[in-house]
Amino acid sequence: MSKKKIIIAAIILIVSIVLALATAIYRSQKAFRCDYDGTRIIPIYEVDIMLKEGKFMRFCSIYCARAWFQGNASRVDAVLVTDEITGEKLDADIAFFVESDVVTVKATQNRIHVFKDKTHALSHARQYNGKLVDNPFKLANARIQRYPQ
Amino acid sequence: MILNAYTIVMLFIAILTGTLAIPLGVLSFRMYQRWGKTLYDDERTAIENRSYLLLHMATVMLFVKLLSWPIFYATLQSYVPNIQGVMCIFGITQLHPYLSSIVQIFKPVVFFSICGWLLLNRLDRGTETAPLFKRKFLFLSVVSILAFVDSAGDLIYFTTFNIKAFVACCTTFFDIPERATAMLPISILGEGYERYMLPLYYLSNILLIAFMGISYPRLTPHALRLTIIGVVLALLNAVITTFAIFEVVAPKIMNLPYHHCIYCMWQYVPDTTFMSALFVIGTFSPGWALLLNLMGKHKETAVTLKEYLRNLYFLCIVAIGTSLVMVTIHLLFKG
């Protein structure tokens, strides 16, 4: 085998490794930490909570967000969850929640999944022994309490 | 029609190559026919002289045509922000579902044929009496027809987009439980097929690389069986890898465990386009080796052909191996 061929192959390999490493590291550094337990947030399971005072909190899973929410509901202005299929952020009030056998974040053992479409939620429930559950962030109730008519 | 820089480049390539492909196809077929007759020396020289211009034109035109495959996907990607409700290239393809399927299937065929012809032409140019002249021009006329059809397809495809049409998002196709890429593995491996897909993907790719490595020193123009086995293994590996990428690799790389769209993977993790290109080249290399072995065999080409076959097997090892390394890096350093 000629030296020239080996050099070309080595260049292709090195360029590819650098490219893949750079992309992977860039993507991993973009990840944020959970405001409840400090776990690195996987974007697809992220829950964002907007506070009335204008602050913004990020959580790694429904579990952490709910744990924080229970003690601070009155401070919350909006809860945004992430559709597990597309990664799209949506208001928790219009999302579908499924509790299934699949764990999303190992650190919290969270088993509640979020979907934008009901068909995806039901399909996930059927595939992974799950069931539809209520929105864990009862913000609508909290708002009624805050602004009684 | 959506007009941007990509569309202009795409249409320019389609018009240029489509227009050149017609005379190229006709002239190369005539050249093939005339070379078959008994010729006087001066007639033979005249044909050879004319063939130089034709071959130059063919080489330039086909090199430009090669670019149209990656530019095709870049153009579709550039349309994503323009169509409401579209997440990735898949949504764009749904504006013309049948035509886009045909174009997308046709492009790799054209790419394979063009590269095959360019290699055959290069092999023939290295000889003194051009023993592959006739075969080369017959093949060129076929490649010209393919290039013409591809260019016509591009022209129709990119000028007839109905941008107001309602299109479905990729999740309605790639993420339903009844999707094609899940049904076949389920029927073969059972419900827990995802567990086996990744080991199978690695095994299949490593086996192909090992076969190429072992065959490398034994590869001669007479070892036709080795090149046939190489093609069979490459095809088998392509099928396994395609299923594995849709079902396991893309969701893991994107960090979207239920999303099986390869177009989204290219969009969210851009270097995977390079990884996919390497995989395609690695898969085509044994095919080009077989093509050269079938069409390029002659006393005069024996030594060069052996070198070409070995180079193609080496290219397969490098390309498949590198794409495997890139997948591994992404799986190890998930974002």
Image: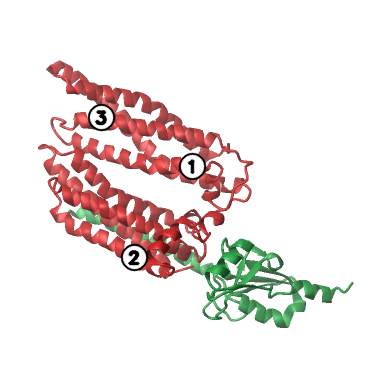
Chain colours: A green, B red
Quarter occupied by the C terminus of chain A: bottom right
| Mark 2–mark 1 distance (CA, rounded to whole Å) | 31 Å
Q: Which residue is drawn at 23% across and 52% down?
A: B230
- Marks 3 and 1, the one that precedes in the sequence: 1
Real-space Cα separation, disc 2 to disc 3, in angstroms: 41 Å
Q: Which of A51 and B170 is in front in this view?
A: B170
Extreme residue toward the right, this view: A149
Please tell me whether mark 2 or mark 3 is closer to you in this view. 2
The residue singled out by tag 1 in the image is B100
Residue shown at the point (20%, 18%) measured from the top left: B46
Residue that badge 3 annotates: B138
Q: Is residue A8 left or right of residue B305?
A: right
Question: SS of the residue at dot 1?
Answer: helix
Q: Residue B9 carries which label?
A: none
Of residues B146 and B183, which is closer to you in this image? B183
Residue that sits furthest to the front in the current view: B187
Quarter of the rendering containing residue B211: bottom left
Q: Is disc 3 in contact with disc 1, using a CB cutoff of under 8 Å?
A: no
Going 80% across and 73% down the picture, which residue do you hit?
A: A143
- The reply to whether the C-beta atoms of the residues labelled 2 and 3 are less than 8 Å apart is no
Where is residue B93 shown, x and y percent of the image?
A: 52, 45
Q: Is residue B220 left or right of residue A29?
A: left
Host chain of mark 2? B
Labelled disc at residue B200: 2
Look at the image and tell me whether residue A1 can be seen: no
Q: Position of residue B264 (x, y in %)?
A: 51, 56
Mark 3 crowdedness (10 Å alpha carbons): few <14, some 14-19, many ≥20: some
Discs 2 and 3 lie in a common subunit: yes
The chain ID associated with circle 3 is B
Cα separation, mark 3 vs mark 1, equals 29 Å
Q: What residue type is labelled 2?
A: Leu
